[in-house]
Image (spheres, rainbow, N blue to C red):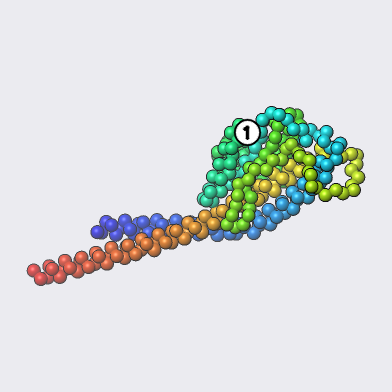
């Protein structure tokens, strides 16, 4: 009985240590939520503004000569996969990697420590990914696409719906498609639409990548806080259950000791 009580005591201490860890990680995630959400909203706004400009340009007949609108028959795909920098975020990383399996022949460009761990390459942390990193990557990708090094560019990221809901999604960036419902505006482009489009595409790609990284990071933080809240709740319930079992074992041991004392005194 004494051994069982000791095991229960050690088990309670272990779960209590886990509870403190989950609470700490949950607090860290909560402290990052507001800043991450602000950055995500700015990224969304910038992406939308650049997208509207590109949509207007792709409607122009002259712009269709752009190498960035070339639709090729080859299946060479480059896929940017944005995963988290850390674990303990529920199914956040697993959902991204599951979607990446749908493109087994794609050349993967990883962003996020967990994505690099899975696919290899230079570590680009999602939390620290900034405009300079996005622009450098976009310049390289645009140059390779224009040179015919690959046929399409996509991004697997996580769309932030709410604190409780995040969804892995795929966005196709290149080649550009003609926007059918873009608003028509009487704008005079100098020197011409084709030149402006070719100059704007790297900015468009950089803005899109940066916006998706920021949204993915916000989703990661939200998923981690939700996971830590759930883990903390489960740990507390386990402690309560173990504490009850421990108290019952202690009571049983005390009762047994009293019984043995009484029996001994009777002899």
- Viewer-nearest residue: 18 or 93: 93
Apparent side of residue 265 relative to residue 14 in the rendered image (left or right): left
Q: Is residue 30 above or below residue 258?
A: above
Which quadrant of the figure contains the C terminus? bottom left
* Residue under pointer 1: 106
Question: Looking at the picture, how far across and down is residue 265, in whole percent?
Answer: 12, 70
Mark 1 surroundings: few (<14), some (14-19) or many (≥20) residues within 10 A: some
Q: Is residue 221 above or below residue 117?
A: below
Apparent side of residue 184 relative to residue 249 in the rendered image (left or right): right
- Secondary structure, mark 1, is loop
Question: Looking at the picture, how far across and down is residue 105, in whole percent?
Answer: 61, 31
Name which residue lies at 79% across and 44% down.
180
Apparent side of residue 6 relative to residue 68 in the rendered image (left or right): left
Residue found at the very far front of the displayed protein:
180
Q: Looking at the image, can residue 136 be seen?
A: no
Q: Looking at the image, can residue 96 be seen?
A: yes
Which quadrant of the figure contains the N terminus? bottom left
- Viewer-nearest residue: 7 or 49: 49
Quadrant in the rendering for residue 257: bottom left
Quadrant in the rendering for residue 201: top right
Name which residue lies at 78% across and 50% down.
49
């Amino acid at each position: 009985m004494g051994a069982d009580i000791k095991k229960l005591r050690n088990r309670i201490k272990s779960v209590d240590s886990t509870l403190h860890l989950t609470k700490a990680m949950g607090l860290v995630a909560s402290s990052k939520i507001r800043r991450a959400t602000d950055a995500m909203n700015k990224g969304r706004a910038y992406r939308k503004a650049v997208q509207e400009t590109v949509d207007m340009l792709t409607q122009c007949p002259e712009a269709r000569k752009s190498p960035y609108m070339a639709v090729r028959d080859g299946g060479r795909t480059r896929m940017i996969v944005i995963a988290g920098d850390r674990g303990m975020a529920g199914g956040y990383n697993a959902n991204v990697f599951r979607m990446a399996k749908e493109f087994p022949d794609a050349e993967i460009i990883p962003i996020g420590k967990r994505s690099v761990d899975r696919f290899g390459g230079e570590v680009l942390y999602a939390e620290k990914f900034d405009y300079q990193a996005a622009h450098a990557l976009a310049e390289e990708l645009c140059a390779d696409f224009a040179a015919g090094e690959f046929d399409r560019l996509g991004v697997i990221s996580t769309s932030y719906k709410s604190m409780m809901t995040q969804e892995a999604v795929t966005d196709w960036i290149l080649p550009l498609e003609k926007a059918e419902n873009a608003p028509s505006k009487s704008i005079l482009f100098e020197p011409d639409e084709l030149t402006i489009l070719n100059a704007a595409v790297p900015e468009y790609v950089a803005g899109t990548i940066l916006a998706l990284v920021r949204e993915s990071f916000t989703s990661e933080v939200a998923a981690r806080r939700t996971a830590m809240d759930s883990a903390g709740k489960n740990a507390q319930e386990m402690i309560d259950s173990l504490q009850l079992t421990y108290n019952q074992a202690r009571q049983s041991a005390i009762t047994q000791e009293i019984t043995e004392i009484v029996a001994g005194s009777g002899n």
